Image (tube, grey):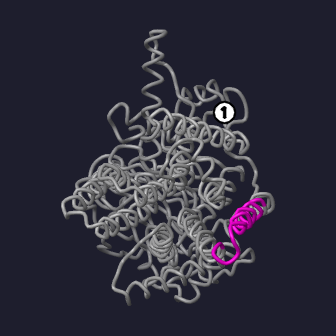
Amino acid sequence: MLGKNVWLYCYVIYISLVLAASLVVISGLITGWGEAYSSHLALRYQSEGLMEGRLALADSVGAVEHDQVWDNGNIQQVWGLGSGAWRVPFEAGTRLVSFVISGSGEAYFPDRIAFGVALTLVVFLAVVALMGSIRQKNLLCWIECLARERERTAALFILVLFPPFITLLCQGRFSVYSEVQAYSYLTGIGLLSGTLVFVRSPRLWMFLVIATFAGLTAFVRPTAGIYGLVTIMVLVIKTSELGWSWWKAGAGIILFIGGGLLLYVTNWIRFGAGFEFGHNLNLNNLYTMRFAGRFEAPYSSEPLLSAARELGSLLFFEDAYRSETFRWRQIYFPSYNVSYLIPLVVVVLWFVTRCRLMFRRRTVRSGEIEILALWCIGCTVPLFLFYLRFPFMNSRYLLDFAPGFAGGMLAFVYILRDLGVPRFGSWFRTVLLTGVVLWWGYQVIFVSEIGRGTVSGPPITREQMLVRMDRPPPEYGDMPEFYEVGTPPVNRVAQHNGSGWDSHSGDTRASIALFVEDPDFLELTVAPMRGVELPPEDYEVIRAKVALEFLELESMTPTEEGMILRFSGPERKRYQSGIQVVFIGLMTAEELHEGWSRFRLLRVRWREPSTDSKLQI
């Protein structure tokens, strides 16, 4: 029997490798021999840092790149530690082998192959979950059972080859943003597959492994933490139903909480707050998005019905309803359609009916379908509430729903099986599988083509990657004593310094990012736009932060041109010394539709300057 099991699992591994490799190649993640390295280096730098025992990418302010964070003297990336940590064993192993063979540790594991390994592992878990109900685990019996229970093959099309996941891989913008989103999807499907395996064959070691992994999911992506939380809740409910002793469930809960505490600590070290993931600190040229994330977001108070209509429309309808309230949006490929909505509604109605029946009978019996439905609803509802009034919306954000939707779609197939097979016979299983394959083919061939975008993150070769890594960061000037209108461009300390401010004219956008050093206070000399007169109270809309800390407005002093606003210095020691990032908001939330603010920024001081100069107004 052991030999038969070995052959069975070898066959499953073979299927997993072929399916994952085919998907990686067909989607264009690997386009040729050696072309398997990501063109975006943030996750590679993160892996390098972790292997050297640090969380930061670098400590030179001049090396800050788009959407990265400068905080506490270090550069951090905002795409989570999970994807970078996943690469560490591959990088370390590759360098060890290189050192043993050639005496040189200069070796780099291909990024896209590391992703392919993760995909292979998830495919393996999904297939194991598929074969979990088969008691005689040998290759021949397994094939015979799959031939008899044909609808179970649909699980591969729904979980592993889920059309929105295929769209994410194929739509052509597989840079670091989509790569982390893809890892997040694999994380969710891995949790779901592990949960199904546990439900069919409960083991303590399996429960503890899944609980540990569930506690670490938010390292991959913050919203992936919802899948981890729901997974541990489902597992605890199942252990209670099985009559396990409290200490077994408690051990899993402790491991789950331990992962959350580790995330809290690393966030505090990296960004200065345990629940901060860097998205309120990142540097870019998206002025309105920066304002909404740091000061005030008008969409956060959007009426409930309007917000629900927009989110539901973005999820399931091509001609999406858009509220007139300002919200940063970037929708560049469709995610779902009505063919997803109807099965999900059926699953919800079935689950509610099932719960009412169990409540009347006062018995709790959760099988495969109940677990799938509970997992789907438990993950989807919190995500819907999270994104309901979220100030930003992007096509890839909607992919956060994909693991939950996939679980719901699979539950829908099994519900139809239980309803149809007793009435129509075993041929109904073939109908189900055929229907899933036809639906899948339509979604992939037609719907995915609609969202195919311009390739902006193609793979590169090792040589191209090394050239980019060896490229020195841009050289900038020294930190000035103050900033002043009419001086050379302020973008001379680091990239995105002065973003939102035209230092020649003084005109400003919704928000500005400026680098300062050892701030004792913050003093802004502002004036209205040319030809505009503003009453003193209008200047009170101007706000300022050093990283995460709001600065208190201490005084307003009128000048011939406008007003001098003096803010207090930061109270947190973390922000009192070294180079810091100051964020300045110059609008109200209602004005975010405007391109430019009403104010001109003439001078910025944070310490007493050694010399003064005449403002060039």
Choose top left, top right, bottom left or bottom right for residue 607: bottom left
Looking at the rendering, the stretch of residues picked out in magenta corresponds to: 421-441
Which residue bears the numbered disc 1?
460
Q: Is residue 149 above or below residue 408?
A: above
Image quarter hosting the C terminus: bottom right
Expressed as whole percent of the image width and height from the top left, the position of residue 103 reads 44, 9
Residue at image point 63% right, 75% down:
422
Which residue occupies the foreground of this view, 543 or 457?
A: 457
- Residue 127 among those drawn in magenta: no
Q: Main secondary structure of the magenta part?
A: helix
Crowding near pointer 1: few (<14 within 10 Å), some, many (20+)?
many
Name the side, left or right, on which 214 lies relative to 4: left
Choose top left, top right, bottom left or bottom right for residue 399: bottom right
Question: In this view of the protein, can residue 263 be seen by the observer?
Answer: yes
Residue at image point 73% right, 47% down:
455
Amino acid carrying label 1: it is Ile
- Residue 440 among those drawn in magenta: yes
Label 1 residue SS:
loop
Residue at image point 58% right, 35% down:
113
Name the side, left or right, on which 164 lies relative to 121: right
